[in-house]
Image (spheres, rainbow, N blue to C red):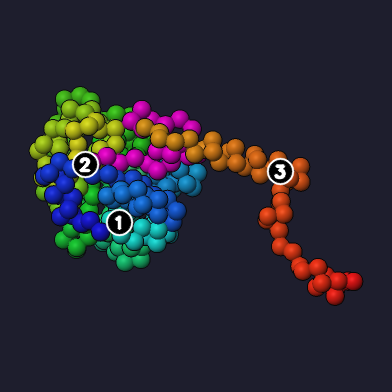
Amino acid sequence: MKTKTDFLKMKETKEPIVMLTAYDFPSAKLAEAAGVDMILVGDSLGMVVLGYDSTIPVTVDDMIHHTKAVRRGAMNTFIVTDMPFMSYHLSKEDALRNAQRIMQQSGANAVKVEGADQVIDVIRALTQAGVPVVAHLGLTPQSVGVLGGYKVQGKDAESARKLLNDAKLCEQAGAIALVLECVPKQIAAEITKQLTIPTIGIGAGDEVDGQVLVYHDVLGYGVGRVPKFVKTYANVQEVIHNALISYVTEVKLRQFPESAHMFTMKEEEWVALYG
Ligand code: KIV
Ligand code: NA
C-alpha cells in the first residue's frame, strides 16, 4: 500500500496521483483493480449513494459503515475518509474523538477535513495525535449554505490570496495532502508550486499533483447533470436501465427463466414420488 512518503515522492517525480471516491465493496474492488493510488470515502456518499441533496446529513456512523465496506474491497489501497459536517467543529476533543472512531473502527488510513480558519487547529491537533489529515480548500461542500451555492472559489485577487495563505497554513499544521475543489487553474498551479505536500484537484486544472473524481460521475451512474469539471467515461446508468427493463419484460412475457436457469429432479425420483 502506498503511504504519505510515496505521495510526496510522486509529487517530486511529477507522477500524477490518481484518487477516486468509493463507497462500498464493489466500487472499492474495481477502484483498486484499476490501479488508483488512493481511495476517498467522500461524504459525497450522502448525495450519490444515500439520496440526500447535500452532504450535511451525513454522520460519522455513515462514514464508518461505508469505509468498512471499502476497506474489505480494497485491502491494499490508501483510504482517506471524510470527517462529515460538524464532526470537527464543536471542540478539539470532539474532533479527536470522532477521528479516533473513524481510524479505529473503519480501516481508514487518513481523514479529510474541509476549510481553514479554526480547522487549522484541528489539523494540527489530529496530526499531533498521529492521525494523517488531508485538507480540502476552495469549494467546500459542507459550507454550501454559507458559500451560497456550489460555485468556483478564489476567482478574485483577494479570495485567491486567502486561498494561497490557507493552503500554506494547512501544510504548516501538518496536512499530508490538499484537495483543491473548483478553483481557477492559475491559483491551483501556484499553490501546487508553493507547497511541499501534494495537491489533488477536482475542477482545479491540470497543474496540480493529482486528480480526484466521484465514482458515480466517472461512470455516469445514477447522476443527472454533472459539473463542468467532470469527465464521464461510461454510461452505466443506461446499461443498468436497459438491463432492468429487459428483466421486467422477460418475466412478464415468461421468457425468463430459461431451462439453463432451472434445477430438475431425475425422472425416476419424480416417478418414485408421484409415479
Ligand atoms: O466527498 C467527496 O467526494 C469529496 C471530493 C469531491 C473531493 O470531498
Ligand atoms: Na467530501
Q: Is label 3 in contact with label 2 (beta carbons under 8 Å)? A: no
Residue 144 is situated, as x and y percent measured from the top left of the image, at: 36, 37
Magenta stretch, residue numbers? 210-230
Q: Which residue is mark 2?
A: 16
Of callouts 3 and 2, the N-terminal one: 2
Residue type at numbered disc 2: Pro
Residue at 23%, 44% in the rendered image: 17
Q: Residue furthest right?
A: 275
- Residue 77 is labelled as 1
**CB of mark 1 near ligand 1 (< 8 Å):** no
Q: Is residue 86 left or right of residue 47?
A: left
Q: Residues within 10 Å of mark 2 (few under 14, many from 20)?
A: some
Report helix, strand or loop for mark 3.
helix
Residue 47: say if magenta. no
Describe the element under mark 1 as helix, strand or loop.
loop
Mark 1 or 3: in front is: 3
Q: Amino acid at mark 3?
A: Glu
- How would you rate the neighbour count of disc 1 (Cα within 10 Å): few for under 14, some for 14-19, many for 20 or more? many
Residue 206 to residue 4: above or below: above
Q: Quadrant of residue 161?
A: top left
Give the x, y percent position of residue 71. Answer: 37, 60
Q: CA distance from mark 1 to mark 3?
A: 40 Å
In this view of the protein, can residue 155 be seen by the observer? Answer: yes
Q: Check if residue 228 falls in the magenta segment.
A: yes
Q: Is residue 198 left or right of residue 40?
A: left
Q: In the structure shown, which secondary structural element does the residue marked by tag 2 occupy? A: loop
Residue type at mark 1: give it. Thr
Q: Which residue is denoted by mark 3 in the rendering?
A: 250
What residue is drawn where x is 36% and y is 27%?
228
Is residue 88 visible in the rendered image? The answer is no
